Image (spheres, rainbow, N blue to C red):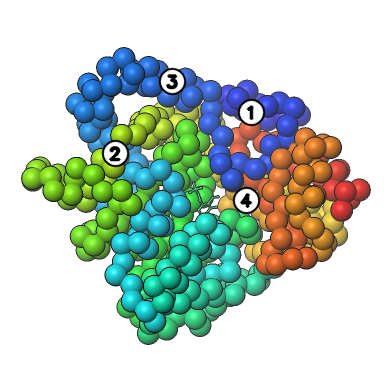
Amino acid sequence: MPSELARHFVLDPEVVFLNHGSYGACPRVVLEKQSELRVRMEREPVLFLAREQEKLLDGARGVLGELVGADPDDLAFVKNASTGVSTVVRSLDLRPGDELLTTSHAYNACHNALRAQERRGVKVVAAEVPFPIRSSSEVVEAVLARASPRTRLALIDHVTSPTGLIFPVAEIVRALEARGIDSIVDGAHVPGMLPLDLRALSPAYYTGNCHKWVCTPKGCAFLFVRRDRQEAILPLTISHGYNAARTDRSRFRLLFDVTGTDDPTAVLCLGDSIRFLESLLPGGFPALMRRNRALALEARALLCKTLGIEEPAPESMIGSLATIPLPDGPAEPLQRALWEKRRIEVPVWSFPSVPRRILRVSAQAYNSIDDYAALAGALPSML
Ligand SMILES: Cc1ncc(COP(=O)(O)O)c(C=O)c1O
């Protein structure tokens, strides 16, 4: 039986959709709200973009501050987490011989934001984190073992993309800070999957997406920059804020709020997305996060049993994503066959490298255990 909550989404009912993690999925009511906002914008573009937008963005930033536990003055809206990471890396005054640290589980596009600095003579260091993994302390040990006096910044995933693991970021951020190393935490999957309190975590930088687990339209993401680091951080696109004479708003806000003409409607739907998710279960958003996590764990248990393997990570490292090691082989043909022959949308990747393979499932409101049973039924004959 499909999830009773699937009717709220416009997802194709013919597809077993197990990849919320890549791009999220936006509910119907939120898409309708976005369409209304777009009509309002196009009815009088100057009124909307030049006179009303600033106040509307301030409202959305207040909502975001509540969601992620931050002072809205420390938050900038960006299009996506990739932009958040690039914004920070490209703002730093890096010199030849400087090191940028990350892990072997980093998202490739964000890892590339570091690699692009190799042109300046910067060295990128990737700490090897095992998978399967026995304990989150293995992550802390791996990262600290590769930190050096030359490390200028560490890019640490809060929830990893290929392996769907919750990394112990609080411990890592503190330990690196004690060595004088700033972190940018890649929390692309965190808003809506895990509770977040940026005041308590207090990293130098944190970026997160709302278009994944908060189900906003695409293009709603944020960059948190701690107050003592804001002066050095410039948006990738410089616009009017750079020489604005206004003193009623921080320079950080003036720089990031206007980066050229753009469609802000995804951001302006943030409150609607949160209200929608809160309305789904009697316990609100926390209940939905618990439900999704329980479903991801149930799915993982089913798939591991089907494949006759041990669960590859402790439960404490699992949120709404679960990654399962597969027998060695080519990844892309399996992913394509699952979609073409069974209409199952699920990512299969070579990880950590060819020929090793993993498969990642997501659990969101529209999923039910039957979706994973369909995958478990299909896998043995297709492997
Ligand atoms: C860990 C992680 N970081 C960053 C991203 C990039 O997100 P976006 O494409 O929205 O920039 C993803 C996307 O899946 C991700 O999983």
Which marked residue is nearer to the observer: mark 2 or mark 1? 2
Gap in Å between the C-alphas at discs 2 and 1?
32 Å
Gap in Å between the C-alphas at discs 4 and 2?
35 Å
Question: Residue at 48% of width from left, 74% of height from top?
Answer: 124
Amino acid identity at mark 1: Leu
In primary-sequence order, the first of circles 4 and 3 is 3
Are the residues tagged 1 and 3 within 8 Å (C-beta)? no
Quadrant housing residue 15: top right
SS of the residue under disc 3: helix
Please provide percent x and percent y for residue 362.
Answer: 64, 45
The residue labelled by disc 1 is 11
The residue labelled by disc 4 is 321
Q: Residues within 10 Å of mark 2 (few under 14, many from 20)?
A: few
Question: Residue at 69% of width from left, 48% of height from top?
Answer: 347
Q: Is residue 63 left or right of residue 33?
A: left
Gap in Å between the C-alphas at discs 1 and 4?
19 Å
Please provide percent x and percent y for residue 199.
Answer: 31, 57
